[in-house]
Image (spheres, grey):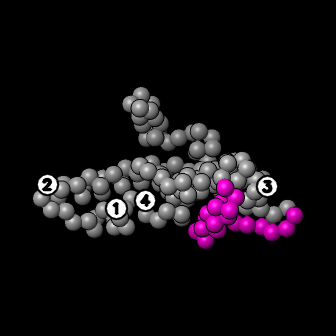
Amino acid sequence: MRLPARTDYALRAALELAASPDAPLTTDELARRQRIPTSYLGSILAELRRATLVRARRGPDGGWSLARTANEIRLADVIRAVDGALADIAGTRPENLRYSGPAEGLQPVLVALRAAERQILDEVTLADVVAQRFPSRVRKLLDDPHAWE
């Protein structure tokens, strides 16, 4: 799986907000804490706001906060907000791909890959990551020493 920097930044900013539920954080503070370019982070936060994952409050006590609890926001929600579909190939969903000859078997593999991504990213919440408390299916994968190679 390859995540663009933009998606990585969105996940890190959302996790920072999840870890600070009692007070909004400014764009500058989020950027500093996660070492994300401030100008870039502003547009990412705007996308997360359009997806109703975060909200902004103006004023001296303003800043960004999650729009829902960290238990209600899944990693897949954040990824889809800034990157679109979890798995596509050159902008095409795997079920819409058509291959021929020896490549015909590639489509079902790509569909299965998307299903595996969904099983993890649609199950793990921001709260799970902040607490490092993962669902059993994810924990089982993490316990496999080969996962870390």
Task: Residue type at mark 1: give it.
Answer: Ile
Nearer the N terminus, badge 1 or badge 3?
3
Pointer 3 with pointer 2, Cβ within 8 A: no
Distance, label 1 to label 3, CA atoms, is 40 Å
Of all residues, the one furthest to the right in this rendering is: 60
Q: Is mark 1 on a helix, strand or loop?
A: loop
Pointer 4 with pointer 1, Cβ within 8 A: no
Circle 1 residue: 89
In the rendered image, the quadrant that contains the C terminus is: top left
In the rendered structure, the answer to whether residue 120 lies left or right of residue 20 reads left
**Residue at image point 78% right, 67% down:** 57
Distance, label 1 to label 2, CA atoms, is 18 Å
Q: Which mark is residue 86?
A: 4
Label 4 crowd bin: few (<14), some (14–19), many (20+), radius 10 Å: some
Circle 2 residue: 102
Residue 146 sits in which quadrant?
top left
Q: What element carries label 2?
A: helix
**Residue at image point 67% right, 48% down:** 34
Task: Residue type at mark 2: give it.
Answer: Pro
Q: What stretch is highlighted in magenta?
A: 37-60
Circle 3 residue: 23
